Image: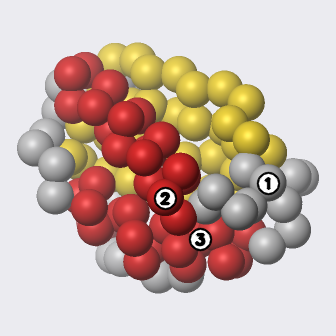
Amino acid sequence: MYTTIRQCCRPDDVRDIAHTTDEHFADQLAQMDGFVAYELIDCGSGDLFTTTVFTDREASMRSNELAAQFIAEHLADVQLERTQAFTGEVLVNRAESNVLELVHA
């Protein structure tokens, strides 16, 4: 498995960003081959993180293209600045069964 972690500086309207992401991106991402998981996290400090998990590196890297397209099409009017992105192989993981419960913004 491979995870991509993206960090963005966010404006104050994180709930609107989350809603737009839930409505226009998350399901599209979930339909990609190799998809495992996606999360959008508000750290409350002006930083917004997303994690995407795929079964292989190639699919994880393709998700970067989809994310860039989504931002250009749906969040162009928001002052969203991607500051960092990392992709790496997952070496250890654990998950509770409730991690599969959908959260909608």
Specify the quadrant of the image occupied by residue 82. Answer: top right
Nearer the N terminus, badge 3 or badge 2? 3
Give the SS element for disc 2.
helix
The answer for how far apart the CA atoms under marks 3 and 1 are is: 14 Å
| Image coords of residue 86 (percent x, y) | 53, 22
Q: Which mark is residue 50?
A: none
| Number of marks in picture | 3
Residue at x 36%, y 64% (from the top left corner): 26
The answer for how far apart the CA atoms under marks 2 and 1 are is: 14 Å
Nearer the N terminus, badge 3 or badge 1? 3
Q: Say whether marks 2 and 1 touch (CB < 8 Å).
A: no
Q: Nearer the viewer, residue 64 or 101?
A: 64
Nearer the N terminus, badge 2 or badge 1? 2
- Is the C terminus in the top left, top right, bottom left or bottom right quadrant? bottom right
Q: Which mark is residue 18?
A: 3
Q: Which mark is residue 79?
A: 1
Give the SS element for disc 3.
helix
The amino acid pointed to by label 1 is: Gln
Q: Nearer the viewer, mark 3 or mark 2?
A: 2
Residue 91's place in the image compared with 6, above or below, is above
